[in-house]
Image: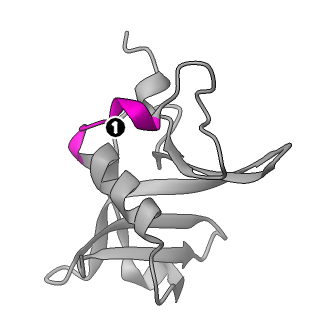
Amino acid sequence: MSDIKFVKLVTGETVIGTYNNQDNLMEDIALIQVIPGASGIQIALVPYGFPFEEKISGTISMDKVVYEFDNIPSDLESKYVQAKSNITISSSMPQDNPLGQDNKVVDLEGLFKKV
């Protein structure tokens, strides 16, 4: 999917989002968080506005990007598409370990209780 970009911002944060060529900005921004664990690291996707926003949304101008990764890991891209579309595959979120296993990318959005 060529319209998805995986970048590092001037703030040092790493995000993934959909590129809007017309306005030269990224939309539907998800923050990439690295979670160290006993068996290595895990990657979590959370809404950029977390904890105040529960959905992946928002925009960031491309002039705030300092680095664009050449390749997006396929599991990261598929988790982003799932989180953005609110379609979740239940087997990707084990009940006994909400952060996943085997250093795979996980979507934490499904764990939040909506009030």
* Stretch in magenta: 85-92
Image-based side of 86 in relation to 41, left or right: left
Q: Residue at x 43, y 54 (%)?
A: 30
SS for callout 1: loop
Which corner quadrant of the image does residue 61 belong to? bottom left
Image-based side of 89 in relation to 12, left or right: left
The answer to which of 42 and 11 lies nearer the viewer is 42
Work out whether 21 lies above or below 75: below
Work out whether 67 lies above or below 17: below
Q: Position of residue 5 (x, y in %)?
A: 37, 76
Q: Position of residue 10 (x, y in %)?
A: 60, 76
The answer to which of 88 and 113 lies nearer the viewer is 88
Q: Where is residue 62 in the image (x, y as percent from the top left)?
A: 38, 81
Query: Is residue 18 at least partly visible in the picture?
Result: yes
Mark 1: give few (<14), some (14-19) or many (20+) Cα within 10 Å.
many
Q: Where is residue 111 in the image (x, y as percent from the top left)?
A: 48, 23
Q: Residue at x 56, y 74 (%)?
A: 9
Query: Is residue 53 at least partly visible in the picture?
Result: no
Location of the C terminus by quadrant is top left
Which corner quadrant of the image does residue 98 belong to? top right
Q: Residue at x 45, y 76 (%)?
A: 72
Say which residue label 1 marks. 55
Outermost residue, right side: 38
Q: The residue under label 1 is which amino acid type?
A: Lys
Outermost residue, top side: 115
